[in-house]
Amino acid sequence: MDSLEPINTHVPLDVFDVVLSHVHDADDLRSCALVCGAWRPLARPYLFRGVVYRPAVPSRTFKDLVAFLSTLPEPGRFLRSVVVDGRSRDGERQLELDVDEILGQLAQLPTVTHITLTALRLSHPIPGTVASTPLDLSLAPKPSRAVKEVKIQECHFIRDVRPFRRILSSFGRIDALVLQHVFFESMVRAQPELAELPPLELELGTVFVSAVTGFTHVLEKMFGGFQRDAQPQSSPLSFAMALRGGTLYRATMIDIVRPLKKYVHTLSMNVLGFTCDLKWIIKEQVNSSPLKRSDVRVPKDWADGFHLEEYSSLDTLVLYSTTTSLLRREAATLLYSGILANNWRLLTQTPPQNLRHVELRFQRYGPHWRDTIDELWAIDDLEPALVRWETVDAGMLVRFPYLESFTCVLCDGGFVEQWGPFGKELAATPRSAHSRQAEFDDYVTFLQDAFPRLHAAGRLHFRMSDV
């Protein structure tokens, strides 16, 4: 009977390949690989495009990974992502590794373009000392190697900044460098050598930093000696930071970005974590007191320390306005007002000469409620007001006469990627009852009314976020 004939006799295998390319759940891909002999070679490349190895867990080490990959036909044809996870089996301890050992292992996976180092204590021998295990660096990645992303999260760099710079200097280009929840240790006896670190000769596309801490004399060396002038054809440098509360985090960002200032073309700053504690965004406030004005931080001169006038190549400033379904009515309006006020503080400290483009990304955690628009409008009704929509609308045209576009990027759902990882404390929220297109249309109508001068001048634009 025709109904019993294999489906692939009627549908080309290329069509199945396109369908499988959109499947990301590992269990679903395993099921697809077991459908029939024709599907197995189609599903395998997508099932094993990303792998994880855990050096601290027996049977999950790099040696075990290599042995497993040797059982696959042409693993290099589809392997693109690797995660090095330093946690022990019980998740209580982090493994200490020399970065050269990791780099030597990654050199044996030349097709990998996305690298994540997580929960590791990373070290590198101090010059003049004897390394515990001599390593054949012939396996180390050549400086010409280009990767799309290097992500370092929940890691501890031991002694100083040298292990971090060793990682960077092993690549010719990194499209996106992501640093989240990273601590840089300091050792007094290592500091004299820090002044003699070689220059960084690599091409960076985007650098994203969140919750990175350490001592000033270490952090300012993270990108010290960065040489971009030697690569005139390189793409513009973007630097993004997720600001958190407290003087320490703010000072940390200033120290890190200082060597890169003159190269930054696009500067992205999310002031949410600086404006309030993230608990107000991600946790149900059922049994706690409501958000008060004292919970919202809007210091008068907080943006001065960034010295934005020194960003001589700055062309685009990206800001964020974050909403949450877990705060409603007056409490939500108070939070959104604080975020808008801190964004305006940044704008008033930005020199007008070079700035041509501003992006305001409307990011959200949880579903979109149409009440959110009313809560944003109510910013103008707060007394005393932290800032008003009219102030931003009129002030943009006065302060930035060369401004070409003020683009509102709507429906940004990348909150967890930017502020996480959260683990179990991340609250579950219901799905939105409205489509992204309905959300987009709601915001367009609201923002055209909130920024009438920018709209009339042809500077106000709208775009739907790709995340």
Image: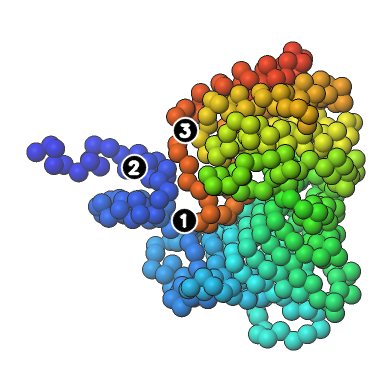
First-in-chain label (3 vs 1)? 1
Q: Residues within 10 Å of mark 1 (few under 14, many from 20)?
A: some
From the top left corner, tell me how far across and down residue 324 is, in percent: 58, 38
2 and 1 marks in contact (CB < 8 Å): no
73 is higher (above) or lower (below) than 261: below
- Which mark is first along the chain, 1 or 2? 2
Q: Amino acid at mark 2?
A: Phe
Number of residues whose C-alpha sits closer than 10 Å to that of mark 2, classed few (under 14), some (14–19) or many (20 or more): some
Distance in Å between CA atoms under marks 2 and 1: 17 Å
Instruction: Name the foreground residue: 204 vs 116.
Output: 116
How far apart are the alpha carbons under marks 3 and 2? 31 Å
Q: Where is residue 290 drawn, in percent x and y?
A: 62, 41
Q: Quadrant of the C terminus?
A: top right
Q: Position of residue 458 (x, y in %)?
A: 74, 16
The residue tagged 3 is: 432
Identify which amino acid the numbered label 1 is placed on: Arg
Q: Position of residue 356 (x, y in %)?
A: 80, 29
Query: In the drawing, what numbered circle is on residue 115?
Result: none
SS at mark 2? helix
Seen at 56% across and 54% down, the residue is 422
Query: For mark 2, what is the residue?
Result: 16
User: Mark 3 or 1, which is nearer the eye?
Assistant: 3
Specify the label residue 49 is tagged with: 1
Name the front one of labels 3 and 2. Answer: 3
Q: Amino acid at mark 3?
A: Ser
